[in-house]
Every structure is written in C-alpha cells, then in structure tokens.
Image: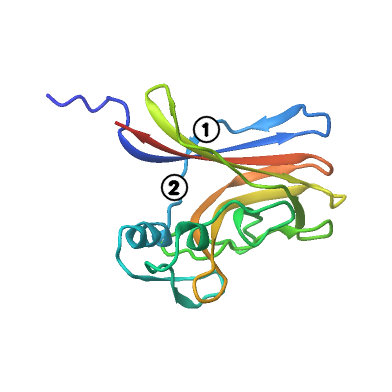
Amino acid sequence: MINMKKKTHGVQLLIRAVVKDPDGKVLSDTGQKPAKSLVIAFLKFVSCLLGEYTEARSVSDDVMPIYTGGYDCSETFRANAGVTTSSWGIVVGTNDGPTAEDNENFVLDTQLTHGVGPGNITYGAMVVGVPAVVGANVDTELIRAFTNNTGVAIDVKEAGIYVFSNLFTPRTFLIIRDVFGAIEVPDKCSLAIHYTLRTTV
C-alpha cells in the first residue's frame, strides 16, 4: 500500500508573518504556513527561463513580453528591492476590495505604499537568501520588514511579491499573492513577511 502520510515532496511555498514592538518584543507570529499564492505569472517566468517566449499581465494591467534570450535574469526577474521601494519585492496591503486569491491575480487589491500617511507603511530592504540545505529540505527565504509610522494601527490582510523586469520598458509583475485574516500592526511597530520556497526530494 502507498503511505499517504509521508512527508511532502516537490516544491512548496511557505509564508510567515511576525509583528514586533519598537523594542523587538514579538507581539504575534503566525509561524510558517503553506501559501496558496503562486499565480500564473510565476510559471510564465519559469517557462521563459527554460526557453519559451511568453507574455504576462503586468501590475499596470498591460500584457507584455517578460523574457527573451538577450536579457539575463537580473533584468527580468528581480525581487531584491531596496529600502523605500514599494513598487517591487515583497509588498503588503489591506485588501479593502476585498479580492480573493485567484490563479490570474496580477496586482494586490489595496497595496500599502511607502510613506508615513494613511494608506502607507515604511518599506525596508529585501533580503533574498541563498538556497541552502535545511534538514531534509532545500530552502530559499525572502524576507522584508515594514514599519508602521502612520500614527494609527494598520490591519494587513494581503501580501505578495512583485518582480521587476526591464525588458524593453520597466514593468512589474505579480508572481505571488496571499490573502489572510487581519494582522494588526500597531503604530511604531514592525511587520516582517517571510516567504520560503522549498524543495524536498
């Protein structure tokens, strides 16, 4: 008989959200949970990296080519955004719509952009980890910290990753989007979103 209770094999995507106060005390921690959010553009990028020309719908709602052999990955599939940059890398939002997760999502419902006023949150720099063996798995972790400097609490209800492409013209594409229950980030507190891409033999 096949043992259906064996560990998960193949490719997994995990998400974790940690809220800390200004002194670094953990206020909430979701722990690692399965993400449900690899949208169609993710596999379109993978297909292109394997040699198949294709197009995807960008955050600006236009359909653009995403890769040709004349460009390398650093110009077409970047997530390592710097501090204050809220147009790509891990992004967060309030999902005011609300919009459910869907294979063809191409943008967050209501993104929080970089700043200190209503509708904003302060964006830290992306951390893109090097793939490494972790126990029985191989993990690559992407992390970004956000700080609430708006003066009021923020309920974060969605997160995702926009990748930057400079093919022909600068564009960003959504490759991951998660919707979850409200994560309260009090004023002056921080939120760190951890995405882990895992392979297991």
In the image: residue 139, left or right of residue 84: left
Q: Is residue 135 above or below residue 44?
A: above
Would you name the residue on which mark 2 appears?
Answer: 36
Would you name the residue on which mark 1 appears?
Answer: 32
User: Looking at this rendering, what residue extends furthest in the front direction?
Assistant: 70
Q: Is residue 162 above or below residue 18?
A: below
Q: Quadrant of residue 95?
A: bottom right
Type of colouring: rainbow
Residue 63 percent across, percent down from the top left: 45, 77
Q: Nearer the viewer, residue 32 or 56?
A: 56
The residue lying at 51 percent from left, 57 percent from top is 74
**Quick one: SS at disc 1?**
loop
Which disc number belongs to residue 92? Answer: none
Q: Quadrant of residue 183?
A: top right
User: Looking at this rendering, what residue extends furthest in the top direction?
Assistant: 135
Q: Residues within 10 Å of mark 1 (few under 14, many from 20)?
A: some
Under mark 1, the amino acid is Gln
The residue lying at 31 percent from left, 58 percent from top is 50
Q: Is residue 63 above or below residue 142?
A: below
**Quick one: SS at disc 2?**
loop
Residue 67 percent across, percent down from the top left: 41, 67
Q: Nearer the viewer, residue 151 or 195?
A: 195
Residue 22 percent across, percent down from the top left: 83, 34
Q: Nearer the viewer, residue 26 or 132?
A: 132
- In the picture, the quarter occupied by the C terminus is top left
- In the picture, the quarter occupied by the N terminus is top left
Q: Residues within 10 Å of mark 2 (few under 14, many from 20)?
A: some
Residue 72 percent across, percent down from the top left: 45, 60
Spatial CA span between label 2 and label 1: 13 Å
Q: Is residue 108 above or below residue 54?
A: above
Under mark 2, the amino acid is Lys
